[in-house]
Structures are given as structure tokens and as C-alpha cells.
Image (tube, rainbow, N blue to C red):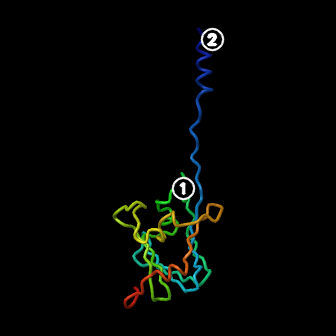
Amino acid sequence: MRNLIKLFIGLFVFSCQPFPETSMTKKIFSVKNVSPENVKLVIFLFADEEPELINLMPLEVFVGDVIETTGPLPNEIPNESTAASSLNASEIIILFNEEKMLTSSFSEEDVGFGFFSEPILRNLLRNGNYVSIGNNEFQFEITQEDFENTIPCEGPCL
């Protein structure tokens, strides 16, 4: 009987697997101006009322904060907003030469791509609009096409 109890205890101990540790992955998002236009990012922060203003000359890059998360990589969950966390933003306005603007924000309605404002496929807060550039870094490129497809401001842009 003692041997049987020892056997069960031994089987129990060897069959128990420790809980797998959840690994944290560092991710970082950046915005690069590949257009020939001067661009200003107006970033409305989650915690602040005053926006942060970032000037981007052609080929300049704005790099967000490094964030650590578990789970899939941002390009595996395109309709999530990990980018918003890295950029610490609830809304971002791209100003082109103080003449035109493109707004990226959240929407109250999901139209199949998550809760993002139009144009959804150019929204800076949406993971799926970033391209992996390696080492868990993801980049959005502001293009000449963005400038051409943006409506001019009627009066001052902000």
C-alpha cells in the first residue's frame, strides 16, 4: 500500500506542469514622413488637454514610446490600437503645410475594421496601418498620396 501511495505521489509530482510564464514583448511604433511636404503631427494625449506638436520634415521620423505587452504582434491584430498606446494618443491630426489636415481618431461605431474614424486604412491609431520594419518595430508612412487626398482647410486648420 505504501508503495502504491509513493507511486501516486511520484506520478502526481512529475505530471504537474508549472504554469507557463507569460512573456512580455516590447513593441514600438513610429511615423515617418516620406512625402516632400512639411508635416506637423498634432497629438492629443490621453492624459493632457494640450496637444503635443511634432514637426516632421521630409524623411524625418517620430518614434513613440516602447510598450510591453503580451499576446500577438500588432500586425496579427490589425483592428486593435496598440499604436495609440505607443504614441500616447487618443487623436492625431496630420497638418500638411498648414493648408490641409487628416484626422485619426476613434469612432463610436465599428464598420468592420474596428472603432476607428475614416479614412480607416490611413488611421494612425490602427495597428493594421503600420508595416513591420523588424525587431518588433512598426512604422506608418505619411505619403504624397495622403497630401493629395486630403481636403484643404477652410480657414485656419486648427
- Of all residues shown, which one is farthest toward the right? 135
Residue closest to the eye, 78 or 1? 78
Q: Which residue is found at the position 46% from the left and 60% from the top?
A: 79
Assign a secondary structure to mark 1. Answer: helix
- Identity, as a three-letter code, of the amino acid under mark 1: Glu
Horizontal and vertical percent position of residue 3: 63, 11
Q: Which residue is found at the position 56% from the left and 56% from the top?
A: 73
Image quadrant occupied by the C terminus: bottom left
Horizontal and vertical percent position of residue 85: 49, 64
Image quadrant occupied by the N terminus: top right
- Identity, as a three-letter code, of the amino acid under mark 2: Asn
Look at mark 2 in the image and give the residue it sits on: 3
Of the numbered discs 1 and 2, the one sitting upstream in the chain is 2
Horizontal and vertical percent position of residue 21: 58, 44
Q: Is residue 86 left or right of residue 135?
A: left
Q: Which residue is found at the position 55% from the left and 86% from the top?
A: 37
Using the image, determine if residue 61 lies above or below residue 134. below
Q: CA distance from mark 1 to mark 2?
A: 51 Å
**Mark 2 surroundings: few (<14), some (14-19) or many (≥20) residues within 10 A:** few
Residue 61 sits in quarter: bottom right
Look at mark 1 in the image and give the residue it sits on: 76
Indicate which label's residue lies in the foreground, 1 or 2: 1
Residue closest to the eye, 43 or 100? 100
**Mark 1 surroundings: few (<14), some (14-19) or many (≥20) residues within 10 A:** few
